Amino acid sequence: MIERTEKKTLLAGSILFQGLSNELINRLVSISRQKQYCKGETIFLEGRPSHGFYLIIQGQVKIFKASAEGKEQTFYTFGPGEPFGLTTLFLNKKSPACATSMVPTTVLFFPKEKLLQLTVDHPPLALSMLSGLSQRLCQLVEKIGSLALHGAPHRLSAHLIYLAEQQGRTDQVFLDMPKKQLACLLGTTPENLSRIFADMSNEGLIKMNGKCVQLLRYRKLLQHK
Amino acid sequence: MIERTEKKTLLAGSILFQGLSNELINRLVSISRQKQYCKGETIFLEGRPSHGFYLIIQGQVKIFKASAEGKEQTFYTFGPGEPFGLTTLFLNKKSPACATSMVPTTVLFFPKEKLLQLTVDHPPLALSMLSGLSQRLCQLVEKIGSLALHGAPHRLSAHLIYLAEQQGRTDQVFLDMPKKQLACLLGTTPENLSRIFADMSNEGLIKMNGKCVQLLRYRKLLQHK
DNA sequence: TCCATTCCTTGACGTATGTCAAGGGAATTG
DNA sequence: CAATTCCCTTGACATACGTCAAGGAATGGA
């Protein structure tokens, strides 16, 4: 169990809650509950009522949808400091997707009713939630755009650039998940992803080394994007 | 120019603003401006700063993204009473998509800063906006799910069912847009859509008649979905 | 260390869907 | 009413991608 002060630091530093008053952060910590998940454990299921939202303390979580035929599409993967389960917070609807931990994960859980009350009582929190939801909307719009408008190679390039920016270097990036999972995120199959990696290697764009990808021609990658 | 009382009725009856106090509706009307668009006119462009959001009084609007190669993906089409342009309202970002009128259209425009102020001052409005954004999130999640997890025929079936429910009958539906546009909405090409319609006709599922589609076997359509 | 998974890659193949081209029919406009 | 434009359909073809199958590499647990 992590300490209260530590929780406060986490919340105050998160994208969602940054800038909120000390008092409000305190309240948020008060209504939150810590939860633990093993690798591959279900956090919530599509079609079930949602009881609140989550903020990741440590670990990695994927949000996805699965079809009856066994296909899977990952919407996003989240890490420490990122919230998820926001979609149905202010809506009386069942969860539109599933959430699963990809590694052992610790989260803070915020129950719906209590958070709703806090939101009504504190306009700054309401604004935070509004901008949090908006951010998700933007991400999904971009996702649809890339899925519908571009091919898988293009999406991989874009993802490599995203990783490069996130990791703050343009010479190489580390894949933070198994390739099978990356395929789900990019909306393709592991086999196809493998081939695309192979093609890009042959073209001299990248050099693979397990989970480390050397970006030999970053500028060309940018153009490809 | 429509009258103030008419505007009030519209707002109070819209999905977004229903249930808000008379006073608040008044304020909303006060900050809104009426705008007119011809058929095919651009309302806003991807990549440009957003200055507020819109509520449709009359007409039809599509929200879409276009690629450099000329491909287009429609996210949604909206009609009277529906809001759009919400995504970047509470975010300092450029518009992630374009909006164009599909027919001559009248809208109410709500400038960003004034609406923001109203939202901060009136928690019920904040809740309305929160649930409005959440609804859009759900729609996009479903859209990604259908694009990534199912084929075009499946998506057409789902759309016909959607139209049937919207139009309140299970025997036939009217397509409310040209097939070319429907193809963009379903994430395919007019040619492919044509073929799928032909296939479904051959299988005895439907009977085409211009913009009217007879649903000969609604239950099978549901299964197909 | 060994065994059992899981992960990854590669090949061969099938298929859905996009592309290009042509023609007919409907609708809009002068 | 004529004429132009747009819309829709159909055919032939190309291709990206998914599927199935097999083998090898890496990983993790006993």
Image: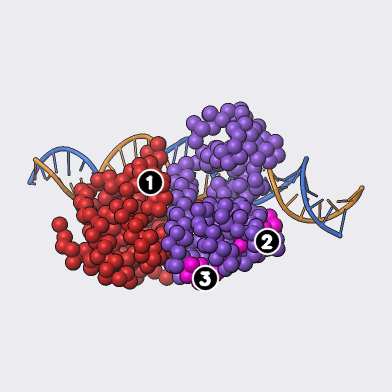
Chain colours: A red, B purple, C blue, D orange
Residue A205 visible in rendering? no
Give the quarter of the image for residue D29.
top left
Report which quarter residue A124 is drawn in: bottom left
Q: Name the residue under label 1.
A: A95
Q: Mark 3 points at which residue?
A: B114
Mark nearer the N terminus (2 vs 3): 2
Contact? badges 2 and 3 (CB < 8 Å): no
Residue of label 2: B3
Q: Mark 3 — on which chain does it sit?
A: B
Do dots 2 and 3 share one subunit?
yes
Q: How crowded is mark 1: few (under 14 residues within 10 Å), some or many (20 or more)?
A: many
Numbered disc in front, either 2 or 1:
2
Q: In the image, residue A138 lies at what x, y percent?
A: 45, 61
Question: Looking at the picture, do discs 2 and 1 lie on one chain?
Answer: no
SS type, badge 3: helix
Instruction: Sort mark 3 into few (<14), some (14-19) or many (20+) by Cα contacts within 10 Å.
Output: some
Residue B184 in sight here: yes
Q: Give the range drawn in magenta.
A: B101-118
